[in-house]
Amino acid sequence: MSLIYPPLQAPKRLLFGPGPSMVAPRVYQAMTQNVVGHLDPFFFQVADEIRSLLGYAYSTSNQFNLAISGTGSSGMEAAVANFTEPGMKFALLTNGFFGDRLGEMARRQGGEVVRLAKPWGEPYDPQEGREFILRERPQVVAFVQAETSTGMFNQAKPICEAAHEVDALTIADCVTSLGGMPVLVDENGIDIAYSCTQKGLGCPPGLAPMTVSPRALDRLKARKTPVQSWYLDLQLLDTFYTGHKYHHTASATLFYALREGLAMVAEEGRENRWQRHQRNHQAFVAGIEAMGLGMHVQNPAGRLWTLNTPRVPEGVDDAKVRAWLLEKRGIEIAGGFGPLAGKVFRIGLMGHGSTEDNVALILEALADALKA
Amino acid sequence: MSLIYPPLQAPKRLLFGPGPSMVAPRVYQAMTQNVVGHLDPFFFQVADEIRSLLGYAYSTSNQFNLAISGTGSSGMEAAVANFTEPGMKFALLTNGFFGDRLGEMARRQGGEVVRLAKPWGEPYDPQEGREFILRERPQVVAFVQAETSTGMFNQAKPICEAAHEVDALTIADCVTSLGGMPVLVDENGIDIAYSCTQKGLGCPPGLAPMTVSPRALDRLKARKTPVQSWYLDLQLLDTFYTGHKYHHTASATLFYALREGLAMVAEEGRENRWQRHQRNHQAFVAGIEAMGLGMHVQNPAGRLWTLNTPRVPEGVDDAKVRAWLLEKRGIEIAGGFGPLAGKVFRIGLMGHGSTEDNVALILEALADALKA
């Protein structure tokens, strides 16, 4: 090829969508650090720090914390693939896109999926959830703690308690909660949690932080069939951390970024960080309501602090608003999809991006866009 | 947590192992560029460039070129998972660790694996390979073009020709050839090729570049069962490139890096790049032989230009040599494993790291280490 490719110049975006969120300068800085080999003593030191910092971020005493070499969706698949065997009953509580995706993955793994489904963004009643689980007596119960498609926070504890009554494992999607809201793995009784790096943790996408409880590990060791995915086989992956054995070539650059993102959570303090997200979320909602807009999630206690879903006002074309924001202000927000297409905006204030200044900035920009 | 985590400071390593290889400054620079969303027009522009540049690097007119969001091993799993259905006959030609891993993955996908196996680092005879394939009449034939565990280059063409005679698809592991040696997808008749970013392309690990032939795509569309992996489902992944549809949150940072790595291949010219690797490989071998060491792969035409496997001299403890190099010189090389444990060094000169100066540097350091 005789062509010359000038070095890539990315535009500066203000990332207020559902993720990636704004990356902290410290994280960018880490990614300029020298790549080392995946079996380098320094890499193992970073991996150990990640293991321990993940326990802190997830509020768990689990030892089995690791980063899957893939995006948050690979974390979902790792959770489903490792804990579902063909013919196993997999109970799903879903009220959004990512809940439905859990079911799709479980079916592909041969699971017998039973569902308690609510319209996107409507809560399931704890009593109804409990009855569903006790009636179905599944081996696995999966749900989405922070539903990115709707802005809804689902309470984990009642689900996990009912699941444990029938000796089922619990899988929680924490993609949009980790680092921005209390996931509380141990307190809630979540057996398997997965998340991503590009939301509450303020890193680029590329890894899926997971944590697995001792009882889930016991279940894993007792599997009758091999995990269909070699790449996501948690027992193989663990040998990298515990035995320093080669499994795949984990990315030093992404591990550096995650280590910095998690270090920033620890330095800020997880509770302080949650409060910062809550405060900025509440300020955003107050501003939205002052503009005469409503929130899609009716109950304030059911709203994510990380991702806001104001309703698109009657007669407004949300795609035009989003295009205006991107073109005129370099701001990314997202629209709804599926049953919420055209009906909600999805506006993220998370990780490094959850600041008072950004609340003011996005509210003003949105007001301008709606007038434009 | 009251702890303070000082920003991570990675040591400077000279990466002469089997990958990651040295990352080019231009690639590091790209990773400091602003992250944009995975549905940003700029991201799609980068993805389109990657699609086209991958065709060039792979020497193919295939349109279906993409980067899997995972390491090279996820590319292997994507190749196996998409083109293997339960009960399907999967023929494997193996003479090393990664060949064996292909078989492990195929078994997990329910494939009926039949093998033609040679000792690690010994070639299979083309005629024997052909007879094996014609006798077994498999639906898929898989092999490793560049075997990272042994330093062996396996000729693709005779395998692919025999496979096509029985209408089988061909899967080639090009993890250690892409960007450093002629993969020649079209000329060799490879239907599905996968690779990594951290070897011949000089990027950090994290993505698996793949290419898929039109006939393989037809086969994919005719599958009777869904691909067990949702995350690696190629038809879903393709909708991101062709329909700009959300599948998962691909990493802007890793895509930037890959775009730069591939742009550097195009600017240098793939043939020039292969010649550079060949020249430096030959200089390295000449130096090794001048030191009185031998190469594990006997036939010079069967040696990788990217990864050299000199034999460990009698009475030398390879682990001590490697530790000395890392501690005294900051140099990473690798040892052998499996049947080659303690018997070979694995010394990579690839991508940005394949230079005359580095040949001299590593030969001198190795000589010093052997004397130490």
Image (cartoon, coloured by chain):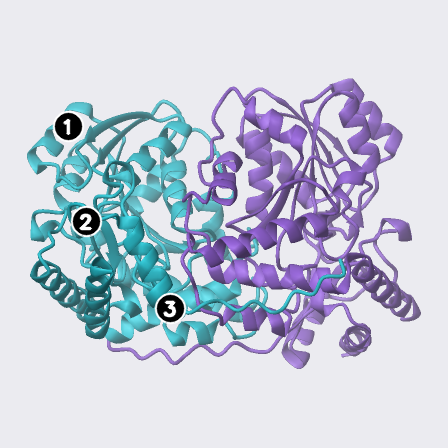
Chain colours: A cyan, B purple
Residue shown at the point (18%, 69%) measured from the top left? A276
Which quadrant of the figure contains the C terminus of chain B? bottom right
Q: Can residue A91 be seen from the camera position used here?
A: yes
Does A243 appear above or below B16? above
Question: Disc 1 or 2, which lies upstream in sequence?
Answer: 1
Quarter occupied by residue A49: bottom left
Q: CA gap, disc 1 to disc 3?
A: 41 Å
Q: Position of residue A83 (x, y in %)?
A: 36, 36
Residue furthest out toward the front: A372
Which is more foreground, mark 1 or mark 2?
2
Q: Amino acid at mark 3?
A: Val
- Residue carrying label 1: A132
The numbered mark at residue A312 is 2
Does the image show residue A18?
A: no
Q: Which residue is mark 3?
A: A23
Residue A257 location, quadrant: bottom left
Instruction: From the top left corner, tell me how far across and down residue A288 is, in percent.
Output: 13, 60
Residue A148 screen position, x and y as percent? 27, 48
Hey, what amino acid is under mark 2?
Val
